[in-house]
Image: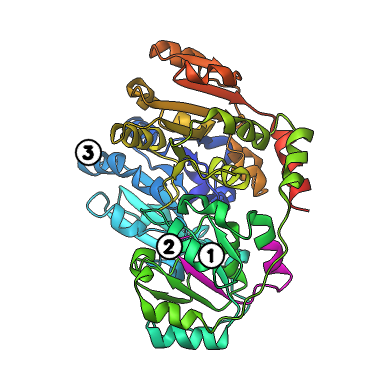
Amino acid sequence: MNLFNLDHVYFCTGARNQEILDFFNHDKLSFEIDERIASFKALGQTKVSNKPIAVCTTSGTAVSECLSAMLEAYYSHLPLLLITGDRPKRMHGKGCPQTIDHEKITVGARQSYIEIGLEELGKLDLSSLKYPAHINVLIEKKNEIAKNHTKNYESSWGGFADFIKENPSPLILISHENTSMKNFTEKMKSYGLPIYAEILSQAHTLSSLRFEKDLIKAFRTGEIKSVIRFGHTPLTKFWRLLEETPLPQFSFDERGLLGLSHGTVFPMGSNELMAQVEFWKILKDCRPFSIRATKEDEIESLIVKYPHSDQAKIAKLRPYIEEDSFVYLGNSLVIRFFEQLNTTEKNRFFGSRGVNGIDGQISTAIGLANATNKQVYCILGDLTTIYDLSAIRDIPENLKLIIINNSGGRIFQTLKLNEKIILEHDHHLEHISNAFNISYARNNYNMLKHVKILELFTNPAETMKFLEEWEQ
């Protein structure tokens, strides 16, 4: 028995596991948003069929969402099959985006575990497994295969001094930590190096490069020859491009994680570095340089041209968000677009970028609001909202939920992946809000002061045109 012969597969959409789609019989395939729900659907079907029923997920927290169903299958002796798409082995244990230890998640909830590559998956005999079973598929994408190798340096001040001596004009990439990196970024500016500070660093407006496209363009034209990263694993696409085309890279990360499959990491955060005389002394040997930055009016003209795009709807939010409030940004497009458009230092920004999952985002924002008296704005996409829907019954007084409804998982459209995994829909939150007795408004920014949920509907075609013109 092979994968094509399975009675049914509950396929939870993701960028990594979409590589597995062709191994299944599409007549026995359903596409799912929520891995927890999908795994319990599969569990229920095994109760009748008593044959292996599969749930297929992408990497990261998507896998952990299936643990409860796997445990139930284990103790009920049911043939549940979990198939997970994973990053290559060389990325494991290094803090690479959406990379966690899948094998450990289902320990104690399975009878079989195998780890194989895509080329072996089609030949696998499922009848040889004991159930419940977990198949972890290591998937190597073309843009993750390094074209060359860079030198690794000692994780010490001596190693950092060697890095600067050999790479005196690095880009400074500041991602985020659990506290503000604003003061650190201010001090870094005095060294005359180009800085890209992500929005969760609380220092994005201090960047000499405000737009990600300038960062990527400079990388592709060879202007960026080395990188120093500060903080946790970055959000920017530029960081992922370094898997395919590595540059000399030295990271300062309080977690001690590389964030890539290569490079050097010094386990120290920005607050500690502020007091390290040796660090600032070494930086004096850097040679300042600059990279051309796009002007603000270039993006403003596209906002006017495409008023129904995700970007324009998010940009219009800016004057409606109170100063000195907290803003929680959901994965995946929302946080990218908000960073692209943000021009304020008057808010503190939060997100869940440890493993980048879309699960539990509303609940996390609720916990954030419970910990402060400040106004909190939670800005999410539609699928992210649907994933955590039951949480809206507990929205506290100081939380506003803003939903960017683009009728599906448009992150997959921007990545040009299989259209089926976009999960296009025509759902909205009005009736659900009414069911929970939560005040709701649609497309009316002025109502944000008066309601708990504001849903903004966007035009996916305009969003894609905006992106195409912006990234030229």
The boundaries of the magenta stretch are 216-233
Mark in front: 1 vs 3: 1
- 6 relative to 306 in the view: left or right: left
| Residue closest to the eye, 274 or 331 | 274
Disc on the earlier residue, 2 or 3: 3
| Residue closest to the eye, 345 or 448 | 345
- Residue kind at label 1, given as amino acid type: Leu
Q: Check the image and report above or below for 399 versus 344.
A: above
Inter-mark Cα distance, 1 to 3? 50 Å
Q: Check the image and report above or below for 232 versus 170.
A: above
Using the image, tell me which numbered label, if any, was put on residue 76.
3
Which residue lies at the image location 51% right of the left edge and 31% below the top edge?
321
Which structural element holds mark 1? Answer: strand
Which residue lies at the image location 70% right of the left edge and 37% below the top edge?
463
- Residue kind at label 2, given as amino acid type: Gly
Mark in front: 2 vs 3: 2
Q: Quadrant of the rendered structure where residue 279 is?
A: bottom left
Circle 3 residues within 10 Å: few <14, some 14–19, many ≥20: few
* Residue 69 percent across, percent down from the top left: 30, 39
Q: Check the image and report above or below for 165 versus 248.
A: below
